[in-house]
Image (cartoon, grey):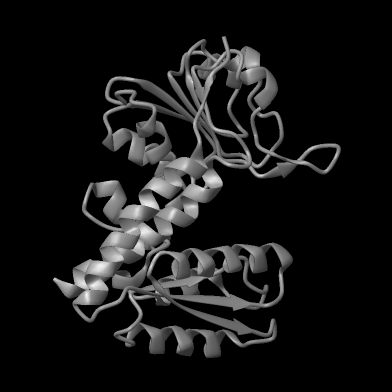
Amino acid sequence: MSAQIIDGNLLSQQLRQDVAARAAALTAKGNQPGLAVILVGADPASQVYVRNKVKACEDNGVFSLLEKYQADMTEAALLARIAALNNDPKIHGILVQMPLPKHIDPTKVIEAISPRKDVDGYSVLSAGELLTGLPGFRPCTPYGCMKLIESTGTKIAGKHAVVIGRSNTVGKPMALLLLQANATVTICHSGTADLGYHTRQADIVVAATGRRNTLTADMIKPGAIVIDVGINRDDNGKLCGDVDFAAAKEVAGHISPVPGGVGPMTITMLLVNTIEAAERETN
């Protein structure tokens, strides 16, 4: 029996309705939520991501400020621009699109963003808030993954979850979010011996490695929830994830597709974080 497909587009639309309503309520009070998006250079993928983020803002009542700069922009100039946006009352969230040109230190840039406006959830402070269970901004992709898992109606508490990947942007925060939801969490990575041994025991698997077919059907516990974070291309150039989707959906209970799964949720949770930032300022 085939798995139920977790429709990220549908869930995203539902969540964006709430975003739009909250944005309208804030705007009525004279405090329209505002997101500044900075793009340095002309990376084609980054241009697409930025365009999608700006459109999502415009479609849901969030003010968007898009600033594009040449790849030779100095680090000092970028930091100065972030400092100005930190002090701009119309801007509640600041996002600097990665990757940056090699001469700019991404850590320095992320840490320059005010904690009140770190809607990407990438700063050391945001990571510390997540680690210690304090309220704060959660990184958008794992935050979206949690919403996808919750949408299945599965009670996460007590389940065994395996996260494949240990990046600071997805793997580590994903594991912490699952831990907060009282799952028993195993983190696997490139150094893990016998990955399948761990995944076959998992009620929930989140694959976030950036490698095709990291998770195959024989590595999945029947009925498990499978969330595919990967963005790859197959031999025909078609978009695919980290999971062998065609075979895995015959074993899993619920599975997210690529595209149409995690992708739209990432942008939606960026909007949610921006709304939360604006609400905190208003209150």
Q: As drawn, is 225 to the left or to the right of 251?
A: left
Residue at image location 51% in from the left, 10% down from the top: 222
Q: As drawn, is 224 to the left or to the right of 234?
A: left
Q: Is residue 179 above or below residue 96?
A: above
Q: Is residue 204 above or below residue 104?
A: above
Relative image position of residue 80 (x, y in whole percent): 46, 90
Relative image position of residue 84 (x, y in whole percent): 40, 89
**Which quadrant of the rendered structure holds the N terminus?**
top right
Q: Is residue 109 visible?
A: yes
**Which quadrant of the rendered structure holds the C terminus?**
bottom left
Q: How many marks?
A: 0
Q: Residue furthest left?
A: 283
Q: Quadrant of residue 72?
A: bottom right
Q: Is residue 169 visible?
A: no
Relative image position of residue 58 (x, y in whole percent): 46, 70
Q: Quadrant of residue 272?
A: bottom left
Q: Is residue 27 above or below residue 166?
A: below
